[in-house]
Image (spheres, rainbow, N blue to C red):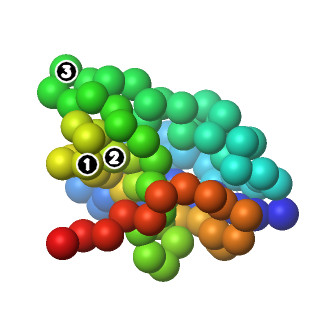
């Protein structure tokens, strides 16, 4: 069983913090409603794909890789077959 822990920057104030959740497969991870919110295009960015940044950070990538947001941390990336985000 794997665990996802949402990343919320300290400067963001929410009425309710998103809860961590457990998942067994990559498909369960990407199908979770919290993750699916990041698939939506915004007024200024177009969703491209999810990527993993070391060590275990799940990133939402937009505009074919020119803009990204941290989504959260994974307990483990074992069994997660997503592209690796490499900052240059």
Q: Name the residue under label 2.
A: 61
Q: Is 25 left or right of 73, judged from the image as shown?
A: right
The mark that comes first in sequence, 3 or 1, is 3
Whether the residues at callouts 2 and 1 have beta carbons within 8 Å, the answer is yes
Q: Extreme top residue here?
A: 43
Q: Is 28 left or right of 39, judged from the image as shown?
A: right
Question: Disc 2 to disc 1, how far (Cα)?
Answer: 6 Å
Using a 10 Å C-alpha cutoff, classify the residue at mark 1 as few (fewer than 14 neighbours), some (14 to 19) or many (20 or more): some
Name which quarter of the figure residue 64 lies in.
top left
Q: Can residue 55 be seen in this view?
A: yes
Question: Disc 3 to disc 2, how far (Cα)?
Answer: 15 Å
Which residue is at the front of the view, 7 or 36? 36
Residue 88 screen position, x and y as percent:
18, 72
Q: Extreme bottom residue here?
A: 55
Q: Residue 65 got which mark?
A: 1
Q: Residue 37 got which mark?
A: none
Residue at 52 percent across and 72 percent down: it is 56
The quarter in which the N terminus is drawn is bottom right
Which residue is at the front of the view, 7 or 11? 7
Using a 10 Å C-alpha cutoff, classify the residue at mark 3 as few (fewer than 14 neighbours), some (14 to 19) or many (20 or more): few
Q: Is mark 2 on a helix, strand or loop?
A: strand
Q: In this view, does 2 lie above or below 59?
A: below
Whether the residues at callouts 3 and 2 have beta carbons within 8 Å, the answer is no
Count of numbered tags: 3
Q: Is residue 12 visible?
A: no
Question: Disc 3 to disc 1, how far (Cα)?
Answer: 17 Å
Q: Name the residue under label 3.
A: 43
């Amino acid at each position: 069983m794997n665990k996802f822990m949402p990343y919320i920057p300290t400067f963001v104030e929410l009425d309710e913090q998103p809860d961590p959740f457990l998942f067994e497969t990559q498909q369960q991870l990407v199908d979770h409603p919290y993750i699916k919110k990041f698939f939506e295009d915004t007024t200024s960015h177009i969703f491209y794909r999810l990527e993993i940044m070391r060590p275990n950070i799940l990133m939402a990538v937009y505009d074919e890789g020119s803009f990204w947001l941290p989504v959260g941390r994974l307990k483990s990336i074992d069994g997660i077959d997503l592209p690796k985000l490499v900052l240059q």
